[in-house]
Amino acid sequence: MLAMQDESPAAAGGSCTPGSPPQWAPRVKRSLIRRLYEESARGLLDDELVDEVGIALLARCRSILTVTEAVRGRIECPSCAAVFSRTLPQLRCPACEWSLAWERYRATYKGRQLFGGAALPAFREFSRRYPRAKRVGDKIVLIDTVLHEYHWNLIRGLSEPQATRPAAACLVDARGLADVIAFLDELSGTRPT
Ligand SMILES: [Zn+2]
């Protein structure tokens, strides 16, 4: 019994211990975005709800940017945030003790709509601008713009293979393409002015 205590390293309380896999922000709930649009349409916009949606989108965008860079060979250490070139088969942060097999890292994002693909500039732009926005009106314009951008990409279509999936599928908890389109159409009916 006593020996078990020794086997357990001091992992409690740490956000990301060396060797632990990265954590990704989930897609944002449609119900939350829908509520924001409905309240906005009624002129009942509240700052907390705007930030709840905006910060959830921001966290998701940052996860997408990090995964997309990782796919392209640039790893951001989940422990100390240092950026380094991917090494195979084992990732090793040169700035701290974090280390993880690339296969394990890859398994954390596979099939979870975290690759930015052709919509990457839109995710990057939102990530850059949202934290600087001060006024609630500016925030909701950014939220609406980024959602509208995805819809626009979807209508226009893009030449790169990744763009055959709607970009909004990376951000919103819809089950598939039809659900994403239906949701964006629904939002168009209550777009903030
Ligand atoms: Zn590190």
Image (spheres, grey):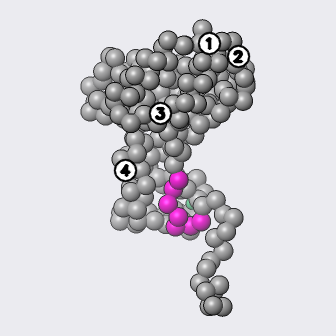
Q: Which of marks 1 and 3 is in front?
A: 1
Do the residues under discs 4 and 3 have CB atoms within 8 angstroms?
no
Q: What's the mark number on residue 32?
A: none
Pinpoint residue 85: horizontal percent, then vertical percent: 43, 54
176, 100: nearer the viewer: 176
Callout 1, which amino acid?
A: Ala
Q: State the residue position of label 2.
A: 44
Q: In this view, does 2 lie above or below 149?
A: below
Pinpoint residue 33: horizontal percent, then vertical percent: 56, 27
Question: Which residue is at 40% across, 62% downward?
Answer: 104
* Badge 1: residue crowd in 10 Å (few <14, some 14–19, many ≥20): some
Q: In which quarter of the image is the C terminus?
A: top right
Element carrying mark 2 = loop
Q: State the residue position of label 1.
A: 41
Q: Nearer the viewer, mark 4 or mark 3?
A: 3
Q: State the residue position of label 3.
A: 172
Does any portion of residue 37 appear in the rendered image?
Answer: yes
Q: Is residue 1 magenta?
A: no
Q: How far apart are marks 2 and 3 (CA)?
A: 23 Å
- The answer to whether residue 12 is left or right of residue 110 is right
Q: Distance between the residues labelled 1 and 3?
A: 20 Å
